[in-house]
C-alpha cells in the first residue's frame, strides 16, 4: 500500500491538474525539443489527461474526470515491476479497491496496460491506493513532479532532471 505520508502529500486533483498544465506549458517554452510533460485538455468527453515521461522508461499518467482522478505509472527499476514476475503481471493488490467508476483506466490502451508499478485514485475523499504488500526497501519513484517542482528548478535544466531528483518546494 502507498504510504499514508505520500497519500497525504498529494494535492487535490484540481491543484494537480493545474500544476501539470503549468509544467507542460513551461516544458513547451523552455525545452520544446526535449519535452517530458504532456497535457491533453480534451482527452475524452469531460476528461483531461496529464503525463510525465522521463525518457528513461519511467512515466505516469494523471487522468481527471467528473468521476474522479487516477494517477498511475511505471518505474522500470521498481521491485514491483510486472516484468520481475513470470509471466509478467501487475503487482498483486495494485488495483484492489479501485472504484468501478474509474475502471476506464484499466482498459485504455494509451495507459500502457502492461507497464504499471503504482496506481492511486481520488473520488472526493482523499487519495487512496490498492491493498498492496510492498516489497522491502524504499520505493524508487513516487509521482512527485506534479507538486514538488518549482519553476526555478525546472528552469535550471529539465534535460538533466528526473522525477526522482525534483524535490523543490511544495
Image (tube, rainbow, N blue to C red):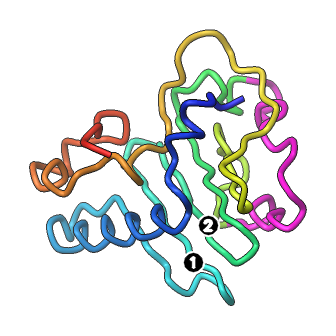
Where is residue 7? Give x, y as percent: 60, 40
Would residue 111 appear left or right of 157 to someone viewing this image?
right
Q: Is residue 75 above or below residue 53?
A: above
Residue identifier under label 2: 63
Q: Label 1: state its secondary structure.
A: strand
Quarter-of-image position of residue 137:
top right
Mark 1 = which residue? 48
- Residue 97, magenta (yes or no): yes
Q: Residue at x 53, y 36 (%)?
A: 75
Residue 140 location (% of width, % of height): 48, 26
Look at the numbered discs 2 and 1 and tell me whether their residues touch, using CB distance below 8 Å: yes
Q: How dense is the environment of label 2, judged by Cα within 10 Å: few (below 14), some, or many (20 and up)?
A: many
Q: Check the image and name the residue furthest to the top.
A: 136
Locate the N terminus and report the quarter of the image it occupies. Answer: top right
Toward the right, the furthest residue is 100
Q: Of the numbered discs in the image, which one, if any, rests on residue 145?
A: none
Rendered view: 133 above or below 100 = above
The first of marks 2 and 1 along the sequence is: 1
Residue at 31%, 64% in the rendered image? 23
* Towards the viewer: 22 or 36: 22
Q: Is residue 91 above or below residue 170?
A: above
Work out whether 8 lies above or below 4. Answer: below
Which residue is depicted at the point 87% across and 46% down?
97
Give the Cα distance between marks 2 and 1.
Answer: 6 Å
Question: In the figure, is residue 121 to the left or right of 141?
Answer: right
Residue 60 painted magenta: no
Q: Main secondary structure of the magenta part?
A: loop
User: Where does residue 150 sit, x and y in percent of width and height?
Assistant: 22, 52
Range of the magenta residues? 85-109
Please tell me whether mark 2 sits on a helix, a strand or a loop. Answer: strand
- Looking at this view, name the residue that lies furthest to the front: 125
Amino acid at each position: 500500500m502507498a504510504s499514508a505520508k505520500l497519500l497525504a502529500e498529494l494535492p487535490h486533483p484540481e491543484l494537480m491538474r493545474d500544476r501539470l498544465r503549468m509544467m507542460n506549458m513551461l516544458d513547451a517554452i523552455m525545452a520544446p525539443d526535449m519535452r517530458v510533460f504532456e497535457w491533453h485538455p480534451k482527452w475524452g468527453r469531460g476528461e483531461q489527461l496529464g503525463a510525465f515521461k522521463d525518457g528513461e522508461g519511467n512515466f505516469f499518467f494523471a487522468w481527471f474526470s467528473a468521476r474522479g482522478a487516477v494517477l498511475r505509472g511505471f518505474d522500470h527499476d521498481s521491485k514491483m515491476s510486472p516484468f520481475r514476475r513470470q509471466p509478467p503481471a501487475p503487482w498483486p493488490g495494485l488495483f484492489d479497491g479501485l472504484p468501478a467508476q474509474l475502471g476506464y483506466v484499466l482498459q485504455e490502451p494509451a495507459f500502457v496496460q502492461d507497464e504499471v508499478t503504482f496506481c492511486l485514485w481520488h473520488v472526493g475523499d482523499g487519495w487512496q491506493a490498492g491493498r498492496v504488500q510492498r516489497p522491502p526497501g524504499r520505493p524508487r519513484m513516487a509521482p512527485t513532479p506534479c507538486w514538488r517542482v518549482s519553476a526555478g528548478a525546472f528552469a535550471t535544466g529539465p534535460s538533466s532532471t528526473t522525477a526522482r531528483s525534483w524535490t523543490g518546494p511544495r
